[in-house]
Image: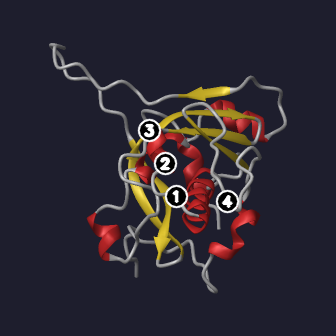
Amino acid sequence: MRLLHFLASIPLGILLASCGSPTPSLSLSPSPSPSGSSSSSPTPFPEAAVPLYFLRGSTLGVSHRMVSTADGYPLNALTALVAGPDATETAAGLGTDIPKGTRILHVRVTGATAVVDCSEAFLQDITSRSVRNRVSEIVYTATSTSAITNVQITVNGSTPSIPGAPLNMSRTFGRSDFLDTLPPIFLESPAVGDTPTG
């Protein structure tokens, strides 16, 4: 289930693209770290709940985490994803195949397609199975809103070469490409991080 309240953190350009209006590409890069020399504290950006798709064993599991809206969606969610599960998520059995140190360098959204550029660490110790896990984590997280349906992953701006990989990394991927990474019963809500009600 895709959650409508996530749309509040989606840039206007993406929403227009989903409605079929002609729009230029939307380009997102991580915000620079605030300088320590500033005499005044920067105004903090509000946070929004976003779904992050980690692994629970060999299948996907979901967490809802509050993240800053400073970089816009899906960059803010993907940045949180590659940083790995936090203590609460780890305690709930969530993990990741994305190597520690992986960074999201850039996200370009054109229409319903997001091109996600990762750092070189994304390829560390990659295997035929781990590449599917890593790509599925990114694809499911980036497509949490109906405005984005397809994702292409690049590394340092280029299509990665992965000998023996079961995926053609030059193409775009959607959720339907990774149905084998879902558990038999896949509930996206409630998820890790949700506050129990009732």
Q: Earlier in the sequence, mark 4 or mark 1?
A: 1
Q: Is residue 3 left or right of residue 77?
A: right
Contact? badges 4 and 2 (CB < 8 Å): no
Q: Are marks 1 and 2 in contact (CB under 8 Å)?
A: yes
Measure how far apart labels 4 and 2 are at the Cα level. Answer: 16 Å
Crowd around label 1: few <14 · some 14–19 · many ≥20 (10 Å)? some
Q: For numbered disc 1, what is the local secondary structure?
A: loop
**What residue is pinned by disc 2?**
122
- What whole-number distance in Å separates the C-alpha atoms at marks 3 and 4? 38 Å
Residue at point 67% right, 30% down?
13
The quadrant the N terminus occupies is bottom right
**Residue drawn 56% across and 55% down?**
141
What whole-number distance in Å separates the C-alpha atoms at marks 2 and 3? 24 Å
The percent coordinates of residue 65 (x first, y second) are 40, 58
Amino acid beneath label 2:
Phe
Residue position marked by numbered label 1 in the rendering: 126
Are the residues at dot 3 and dot 4 in contact (C-beta closer than 8 Å)? no
The secondary element bearing badge 3 is classed as: loop
Q: Tell me the kind of residue under disc 4.
A: Gly
| For discs 4 and 1, the disc positioned in front in the rendered view | 4
Which element type, helix, strand or loop, lies under badge 4?
A: loop
Point out residue 98 in the picture as x, y percentages from the top left corner.
Answer: 46, 57
Relative to residue 28, is residue 19 drawn left or right? right
Checking the image for residue 69, the label placed there is 3
